[in-house]
Image (tube, rainbow, N blue to C red):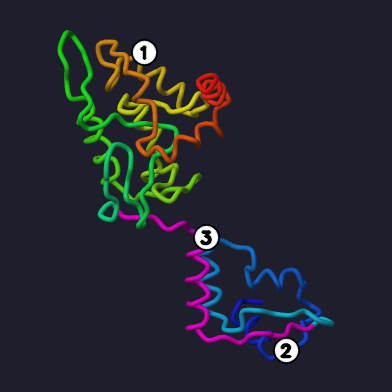
């Protein structure tokens, strides 16, 4: 039985033909199918909800195409996370971005301040400015998607991706960001960047510990939740 015939029979509440396998009949509606096929099925068949009773299919909702399109819009909003285009993302300072109206800081990393200087071969060079430039380049290449994991009044902590790229990991791998917290998932990436003397690690430069912190002090207590070592250090300072 083709789909159009199935729709006609369902709309009239006609008894299912005994010669047609019920599973095959129900499968003609493609209830569990890719979203692209759901679109086609809804557009072809106005009744979209059915009740099976005593071998009959009864449409419990008869909806026109406008209702179906509204339903599909809601479906896509739920299934596919909304991303922010490159034009809507703004780099405020260091690794703090303006994203969908919120100020967010990238989790587990710290980008050197734009004014930071690194030492190499007996000279200083503007590694902070280069790190800031690289971050700005990345967020302008594609749509940015962020998942907020810690929120404060001033700024939110988030993990972000640009296309298929983990933004934090990319910056650490290239040597333009440092890991924050002893349990950062980017520690191995940082070790590799240091080994290859990438980015700020050029000429075996060792950045000061003060560079390993979030730019907003409201987020720093979050480290205690991530890292027992940090909590121990904090207690020892208070004694």
Relative side of 172 to 123, left or right: right
Mark 3 or mark 1, earlier in chain: 3
**Which residue corresponds to mark 1?**
195
User: Which numbered disc flags the more N-terminal residue, 2 or 1?
Assistant: 2
Q: Is residue 61 magenta?
A: yes
What is the crowding at mark 1: few (fewer than 14 residues within 10 Å), some, or many (at least 20)? few
Label of residue 79 in the image: 3
How many numbered circles does the render carry?
A: 3
The quarter of the rendered structure image containing the N terminus is: bottom right
Residue at position x 21%, y 36% in the image:
133
The picture quadrant where one finds residue 41 is bottom right
Badge 2 element: loop
Indicate whether 41 appears above or below 238.
below
Residue at the (45%, 27%) spot, across then down:
186
Q: Which residues are magenta?
A: 56-85
Q: CA distance from mark 3 to mark 1?
A: 41 Å
The image shows residue 191 at horizontal and vertical percentages of 41, 17
**Residue ID for mark 2:** 13
Residue lying farthest front? 239
Which one is in front, 227 or 183? 227
Residue 184, image x, y percentages: 49, 28
Regarding mark 1 in the picture, which secondary structure is present there? helix
Above or below — where is 111 with respect to 235?
A: below
Q: CA distance from mark 3 to mark 2?
A: 32 Å
Q: Secondary structure at mark 3?
A: helix
């Amino acid at each position: 039985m083709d789909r159009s015939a199935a729709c006609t029979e369902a709309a009239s509440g006609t008894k299912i033909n005994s010669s047609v396998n019920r599973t095959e009949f129900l499968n003609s509606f493609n209830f569990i199918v890719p979203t692209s096929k759901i679109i086609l099925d809804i557009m072809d068949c106005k009744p979209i909800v059915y009740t099976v009773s005593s071998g009959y299919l009864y449409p419990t909702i008869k909806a026109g195409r406008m209702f179906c399109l509204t339903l599909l819009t809601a479906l896509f909003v739920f299934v596919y996370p909304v991303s922010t285009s490159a034009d809507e993302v703004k780099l405020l300072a260091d690794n703090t971005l303006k994203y969908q109206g919120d100020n967010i800081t990238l989790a587990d990393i710290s980008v050197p301040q734009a004014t930071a200087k690194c030492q190499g071969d007996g000279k200083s060079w503007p590694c902070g400015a280069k790190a800031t430039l690289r971050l700005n380049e990345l967020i302008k290449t594609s749509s940015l998607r962020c998942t907020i994991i810690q929120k404060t009044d001033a700024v939110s902590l988030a993990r972000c991706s640009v296309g298929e790229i983990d933004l934090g990991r990319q910056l650490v791998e290239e040597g333009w960001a440092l890991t924050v917290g002893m349990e950062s998932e980017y520690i191995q990436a940082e070790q590799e960047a240091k080994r290859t003397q990438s980015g700020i690690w050029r000429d075996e430069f060792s950045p000061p510990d003060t560079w390993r912190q979030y730019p907003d002090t409201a987020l720093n207590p979050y480290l205690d939740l991530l890292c027992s070592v940090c909590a121990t250090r904090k207690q020892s300072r208070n004694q």
